[in-house]
Amino acid sequence: MINKGIRKIDSTAIVTGKPLYTEDLIMHKDVLTLKLLRSPHAHAKIKNIDTSKAEKIPGVVGIYTYKDVPQVRYCVPGQTEPEASPYDRVLLEDTVRFIGDEVALVAAEDEKTALKALKMIKVDYEVLKPVFDAREAEGNEVVIHPEKDIVEPYPFGLDAKNNIVSKEFFEFGDVEAKLKESDFVVESSYKTQSQSHCMMETHRSYSYKDINDRIVVVSSLQSPHNVKRILRKVLGIPSSKIRVIKPRIGGGFGGKNIAATDIFTAFVTMKTGRPAKFVFTRSETFVGSNSRHEMFFDVKVGADKEGNLKAIELKSLNNTGAYGGNGVSVSSESGHNTLPIYNDIDAVRFNARTVYTNRLPAGALRGYGATQGIFAIDSAIDELAHKIGMDPLEFRIKNIIDRYTNGKAAEDEILSCELRQCIEKGKKLINWDDKYPCKDIGNNKVRAVGMAVANHGSGIPRVDMATVTIRMDEDGTYKLLSGLADLGQGADTIQAQIAAEALNTTVDRISIYTGDSDLCPYDTGAFASCTTTVTGNATIKTANKLKDILLSVAESKLGFKKEDLELGKDRVFVKNDNSKFVLLEELGRESVGGIGFASDDVPVVLEATESFGMLKKIKPFIAGFAEIELDKNTGEYKVINFACVPDCGTVINPTLARIQVEGGVMMGIGFAMYEDPIFDKDGRLLTDSFLQYKVPTKKEVGNILVDFAENFDPGGPYGAKSLGEIVIHTPAPAIANAIFNATGVRLRELPMTFEKVYMGMKNNNKQL
């Protein structure tokens, strides 16, 4: 079942409109509707809140302020403990730190009443001076988190009195010496903007009490087990009193890896005993959740005249906004998931800082810091190649790592890399030799190509883990239980394929049950590109254990040793005589009836559970090639072709993999060209709907050409590596490099709008 392009196992239910999503599953007629009063100020102290008039409105059940909620510090990302985030939030607080911060929670019988109550709450603010620019935050007189009870789960450099969330530094080799001996050096600065997730389904959750007085939270989220832990901490109740259920999710991209609504619904249910629901509007998802981290980079790269890369220095400044969720690891990954591409050079230095500002909090978004870092590093590498006078494609091939590397920026071993194959295949797809660097097509228009390379991770070693249970039903089919979260990417289908391969059966004989903290074993969740590799390895271990149990049971039934038996689609048979067999249905039926026995006459249950934890890095690689058509009169351009070739090891499902690449490229083009959250001088987000916030559609994007490098990673399930995040990395730098080849203009700030291209040509005295 590996390398088979089967359709998603839930596709029919989704496209026929079956009730699968959180809001579809609300079954209580007396459910309360929740709404939040949000701060109109970027930084203020709440001096007084008057809720008396709002409380008198018929249908208002409860209004809660900082005086009514637990003052327990926590972080919202559903990360594995110890979290790479400071505990700097409380549910509601007497200080607000960005426009949209939570002030008061209303629970009412219906939405109309809740909205009416919000307007009747009177708040007296002491407005404080804000700081918006990350470059001015460190050591600023404005201290965003002066409180003394912030928790640093492990030492990552938190210095809240100076607005510093984290600091990281590593180096190998003598960077100064290697830059000094370089014949060519490029030193440049880059900026990448924040970006909204734009998932179709907004944040939402629904909670109620079950017959055992336990709080049940049904929520669209990426990490049910970790969110359960957050609920336990904030609400102060035992884990045994909480159940979290994840139904189908209408997209996430990292945005659903936070407890955006869950704590509020669970809190109201705990206080009132009634069911509660909280559904974000699209505007609330823009202004009240999180976004990609805005980042600033300073890059130095040096090479000799033969094109041998000698040194890289990367300085990163990360704007985490008002709260530090994910800021530590996003900052770290801007180096650790970018620099290993050039791991075999002489010297590398990485210096990263994350700071607080009074902007919308940032968080996890597909690419997770590496997308930003790759734009800076790859743009500088491309510029260095041009300065030397080399084809940038050949310069990259000369300097990237080979199939294996160890230590240095990579830290651990990288056991497989086919990046050269990615480049060669992409080169042919885009027809690089014929099109590089630029062709005049008349009417003052040109076509140009540019390229970029990237790497990522497949889970976090010594952090990410998964447990999987597989059991045989009485009809001889299998049930797989896992805590993974399918966000729409097809994770359930991939696990079914992996299990079917291990059990030598077909996908239709595997039923998948996921995302219920009561029924499904622990899984870190869908983040860090870990699902296929981490959960997949756990699935293989579990399937192999169950297979051994089945062969042991069949041994006594058939009178042959299990070494002579083979597990088939629906039976166990003798290897050299397949006319001798026992049906799995018979084994399943007898096991349920208590009469299934192993060869040593010990009763067995046809069920297995195994765990897998990441120990070694499993890194995918990718090459991306952009072909643009650009009008030199106006600066307007469009991507007419984008070729993308990942090395994701064994491709489990080519159909889903191709769709994953196409979607990631589209998202990367949006980041590169269009998407730009705009704030006014007071810190108010102006682009809070799809009327103002522009994302590309198929109309704005030309052909997306996809191929895959052939590779096998010994650490991945059947040789597979991750794919979901790496596909967003290359569009921005590849397009930037194509723009340079078309115009001679280097754009170092995203998004690369038509106006920026035009002004770049004008300022460089290019033809208008």
Image (tube, rainbow, N blue to C red):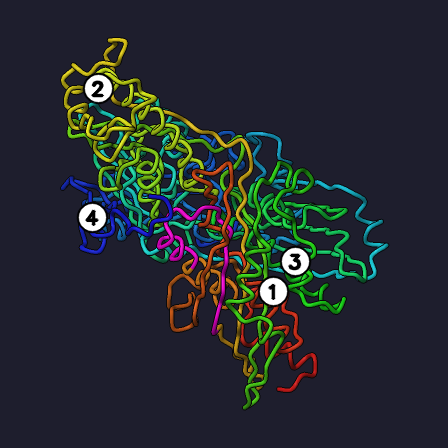
Residue 732: x %, y % from top left? 55, 63
Residue in the image at 60% along x and 59% along y: 375
Provide the residue designation for mark 3: 397
Label at residue 749? 1
Horizontal relation, residue 344 to residue 272: left or right: right
- For the view shown, which residue lies furthest in the bottom direction? 443
Return the residue nearer the eye: 466 or 136: 466
Residue in the image at 66% along x and 70% along y: 746
Q: Nearer the viewer, mark 3 or mark 2?
A: 2
Residue 48: x %, y % from top left? 43, 42
Provide the residue designation for mark 4: 110
Quadrant where the C terminus lies?
bottom right
Please report whichever mark, 4 or 2, sits nearer to the chain's N-terminal start. 4
Amino acid type, label 3: Ile
Quadrant where the N terminus lies?
top left
Return the residue nearer the eye: 612 or 664: 612
Amino acid type, label 4: Asp
The secondary structure type at the circle numbered 3 is helix
Q: Are marks 3 and 2 in contact (CB under 8 Å)?
A: no
